[in-house]
Amino acid sequence: MSSAPPSAAPQLVATDLDGTIIGPSGEISERTVRALRAVEELGVPVVFVTGRPTRWMAEVAERTGHTGLAVCANGGVVYDLHRERVVDHYPMSVEVGLEVARRLRAALPDVGFAVETLDGFSREAIYDTRWDLGSELRVDEIESLLDGPAVKLLVRHQSLDADTLLAQAREVLGDTAELTHSSIGGLLEISAAGVSKATTLARLCADRGIEAQDVLAFGDMPNDLPMLAWAGTSYAVGNAHAEVLAAVDHHAKSVEDDGVAEVLESVFHLRPA
């Protein structure tokens, strides 16, 4: 696998957050922040493309200077970091959400569901939340929670790892919805069919007259694979999931070693921090 930079300067940089530029400490390093800001000062947009909900973006916006757009919820939401507001979204219908829940529960009775909407997060009592405990809008059965379009469904299983859960869910659901994961534990993320990090990023680029071949992308987990396959030049950071490392031609150093910053410094001829 190659670590060589692209031959032509990219017109847009797209990067995942957690595990790619946000390490175990939960923060973006000074070196990475400087590199991202330097790229934007050259007139090259930087788009954060993340599985995170919008409510988890305020700290990122503050750290990186409140500039540009973010693709959140694995493509389900476009978020303006400057004004901290949603500018577009691609939700799953109630009917599809209920069908997804019915079929998954029939096949995997022990799963618990949670729902992300533009208003916030709700969950079933059986869904073991690790980050949003106490901030739920509601705790109820999935049939009651799905009373409007969802930007993302979350499915947790206590005994299956994420790869196994994803494989089994794909057998059950086929192309009914877009399925992925971004964690080691048994957590599955489900978007409307045809909605991924790649599709929403492609829309943003098309609006700006930027082609896929002119996009530089970074990621680490299976939910990044569509984006990494779409972009003209893609890097997996060294700590990435094995499937991502195998799928992507270019490899950067790990998030803890500022791999993304190092590549940006090389590609854009920036002075290293």
Image (tube, helix red, strand yellow):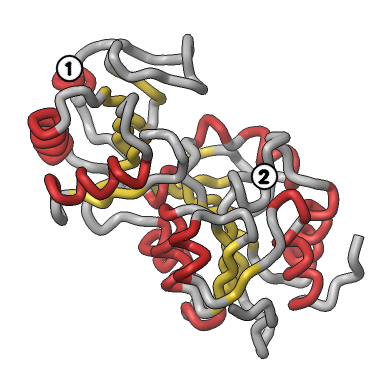
Taking depth in this image into account, of 264 and 76 the one nearest to the observer is: 264
Residue 182 visible here: yes
Q: Which amino acid does label 1 sit on?
A: Ser
Query: Label 1 belongs to which residue?
Result: 144
- Residue at image mark 2: 22
Check disc 2 and report its element: helix, strand or loop.
loop
Quarter of the image where the N terminus is located: bottom right
Residue at 91% across, 70% down: 271
Going from N to C along the chain, the mark reached first, 2 or 1, is 2
Mark 2 or 1: the one toward you: 2
Q: Residue sitting at 26 percent across and 23 percent down?
A: 112
Residue 191: image location, x then y, percent: 29, 46
What amino acid does circle 2 point to? Ile
Binning the other alpha carbons within 10 Å of mark 1 as few (below 14), some (14 to 19) or many (20 upward) gives few
Depicted 271 relative to depicted 120: above or below: below
Is residue 265 toward the left or the right of residue 7 in the image? Answer: right
- The image position of residue 185, as x and y in percent, is 43, 34
Q: Can residue 94 be seen in this view?
A: no
Q: Which mark is residue 125?
A: none
Image quarter hosting the C terminus:
bottom right
For image coordinates 50% across by 72% down, the residue present is 248
Residue at (62% x, 54% y) in the render:
239
